[in-house]
Image (cartoon, rainbow, N blue to C red):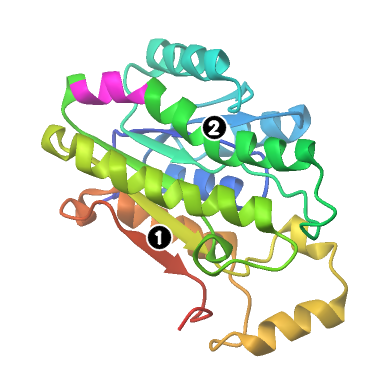
Amino acid sequence: MKLLENKTALITGASRGIGKGIAIEFARQGSNVAFTYSSSVDAAIALEKELSDLGVKAKGYQSNAADFDAAQELAADVMKEFGTIDILINNAGITKDNLLMRISEDDFDKVIEVNLKSVFNLTKAVIRPMMKQRSGSIINMSSVVGLKGNAGQANYAASKAGIIGFSKSVALELGSRNIRSNVIAPGFIETEMTDKLDEETVKGWRASIPLKRGGSPEDIANACVFLASDMSSYITGQTLSVDGGMLT
């Protein structure tokens, strides 16, 4: 029995890394997948094919989650194409790291807009259909940095902490409609982005984690499957840290 059979998920920022890992695992679990990407057209086409080959309906949409109107349009397009949105995963995110003394106003605004405002945009876009069908699972991607802060990432930490407060409020507002809202806070996940770090830095990270390894996109995807499926039907307003014990 596949855990997400006959459900439709909308996943933002899914052409690579964690988002791609989630999309593939969801398709394996029987979910139809609508996903967004910003610029990697070739990667999106390849992912669409990979998901379709797993026997589900899949479609990529080039869309900017940070744009309010584009997010509303995206949700309407997905509803038209798939007929339902059962799961929303707000995964799109960027970093523009710098010490506070050096962060420009633009770098602060951009990170808040892409990481935090996009969560508001998309959540607002899907709640009407979810309320109509009286069910839905919203999963927002925060970070260990949103829970403990990090030098050189004040903008990123603020955006990821904001996601947690937003998600708890949504859980309180929409619980009576059987719509759940939860957060996943990934730790050090090894993706294309971390491949750019030098080996010594990565070794240092791994050594500081109780499980002595970085996580994989699959680790995050598995947590998302749990929170998207009926296995977690009595869980809402929670933050699940998937970090190998980093914050223990």
Residue positioned most to the left: 176
Q: Is residue 84 above or below residue 46?
A: above
Magenta stretch: includes residue 32:
no
Q: Is residue 4 visible?
A: no
Magenta stretch: includes residue 128:
yes
Which residues lie in the magenta part?
A: 126-131
Label at residue 223: 1
Residue 16 percent coordinates (x, y) = 68, 45
Q: Residue at x 71, y 42 (%)?
A: 108
Residue 129 percent coordinates (x, y) = 28, 19
Amino acid identity at mark 1? Ala
Helix, strand or loop status at disc 1: helix
Residue that carries the numbered disc 2 in the rendered image = 118
Looking at the rendering, which quadrant does residue 84 occupy?
A: top left
Q: Is residue 63 visible?
A: yes
Label 2, residues with CA under 10 Å away: few <14, some 14-19, many ≥20: many
